[in-house]
Amino acid sequence: MSDQHSQSSAVDAVIVGAGFSGLYLMHRLRGLGFSTRVFEAGTDVGGTWYWNRYPGARCDVESMQYSYSFSEELQQEWDWSERFSAQPEILEYAQHVADRFDLRRDIDFETTVTGAQFDEAQRRWNVETDKGERLSARFFIMATGCISTAQIPDFEGLSDYRGATYHTGHWPHEGVDFTGQRIAVIGTGSSGIQAIPVVAEQAAHVTVFQRTPNYSLPSQNGPMTEDYARSWKDNYTALREEQRHTAKGNIRELNNESALKVTEERRAEMYQKRWDIGGAAFLSSFNDLLVDRDANETAAEFVRDQIRSIVKNPAMAELLAAKDYPIGTKRICIDSGYFETYNRDNVELVDINDTPIERMTPDGLNTSGRSFEFDSIVFATGFDAMTGTLYKVDIQGRDGATLPRKWAAGPRTYLGLMTKDFPNLFMITGPGSPSVLSNMMVSIEQHVDLVTDCIVHMRDKDLALMEPTLEAEDYWVDHVNEVAHTTLFPLAASWYMGANIPGKPRIFMPYIGGVGRYRKICNDVVADDYRGFRFEADTAQAAAAAE
């Protein structure tokens, strides 16, 4: 530990995580005169883009929109090489930001926060790390991301398997060479869909084990053109403001027509146009795709027809064509040649609904109908989203309250920012905020700005503690669920609903009302003297002022 850190066991704020949330939060708080310590389990900054190094890892938001907006100089000096950036370039961008704003000096790398207990008498958080350090902070801020706790199914016999195993969310930093190997990929969510085409180009043979087929759209990725980059850089001020008030935090061409009120020819034309453009803009083809099942089915069938036209084996195409849930109600996947990969002679698809995986063996695995031998197994099985990483830290609020107990029936927050009985605990893009349904960079900046404004407000007003009221929390939980059920999203067994984790409550966790609507709600709360929050005065400051 550095001499500087040994002298800073009492700070204004402890921040957990040095991804895009933690970096911007530290930058803001430092500029406002607050002392901070940041703890990061990895050896470097980057968060999601530090850990997720699997082959083909790439952002599904356009590069020009997936970046910080807080510094005009940063916006102008950084150049992206592709329309949709790959993991190495996004990590390089995070490293550039850390160096440019001298952020590393307050980050403890390779350090995990193991616990944080609220001290009622001192009105501070006592924080512990796996290095044995204990420190005190007025504010405890979880900037750990929404999808950062890897989920590996509890297969019988997993410890018996003698080959190599990998999870897409914790990929070896030195990379993996699959040349000549027989590979299993278990899972066809976003990471599997991105990894499988790349792995198939290396391996002798790839067997994909699919439980639920996924809708995936082509990225139509390509090099960044100077003209396109300049169109953003010359207009960033206006375009960023527009981003902040859209539904998803992305600027895309919206079509305000109903899919059911146009001709069949018009529908086909619009879907083909959006398919050819690439990316998630396909879901904006019409205004009712995520609220009307019949409208949604027209889009879903178009995608299924695309799969049927791409995949040469008709039986395999039908297995890959999702039919049991509306398109867009699970996180839409954006791919580069995913369906085309199934035309390769070295790729096989196994439907584990038809023949479930029964157990792992020393040489591979057995399904109900067949034994397989593999040199390596890749788990593309996703994450314990939204709450998993929060639960990994032993966070204890008033009277020993813990998040797992309080949230036993599902997350309870106000604005996705705070939860009652945990004063001065902030969650960046927590459950109940737009978070994973949005361009995360836009939501991160909004939440960080909101948190720092709260902390400045407390300093200016000599306030010691802040937490939501029970009434505000009840209202927000009801509102999040009410808005979710005006859409088709609850019809899918998605990780938005916690459906990928055995025993996890089935409740829609993010706020689906939209980035712009959510921002207005937050702004109105602040303007109404922080409606729904309860503050306690700093008695020491008050006493000093009285003297």
Image (spheres, grey):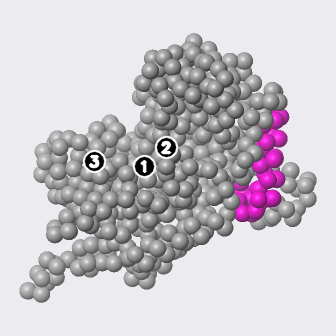
Q: Secondary structure at mark 3?
A: strand
Residue wearing tag 1:
388
Q: Is residue 475 above or below residue 409?
A: below
Residue 454 in sight: no
Q: Identify the residue at the far top of this view.
A: 180
| Sequence order check, earlier mark of 1 and 3 | 3
Residue drawn where x is 46% and y is 73% of the image: 474
- Residue 298 colored in magenta in the image: yes
Q: Is residue 540 above or below residue 16?
A: below
Location of the C terminus (image quadrant): bottom left
| Sequence order check, earlier mark of 3 and 2 | 3
Percent coordinates x, y for residue 277 in the rendering: 73, 46
Rendered image quadrant of residue 136: bottom left
Residue drawn where x is 12% and y is 51% of the image: 7
Of 424 and 245, which appears nearest the observer? 424
Q: Which mark is residue 383?
A: 2
Residue wearing tag 3:
113
Q: Is residue 255 above or below residue 376?
A: below
**Range shown magenta:** 283-310
Rendered image quadrant of residue 46: top left
| Sequence order check, earlier mark of 1 and 2 | 2
Q: Secondary structure at mark 1?
A: helix
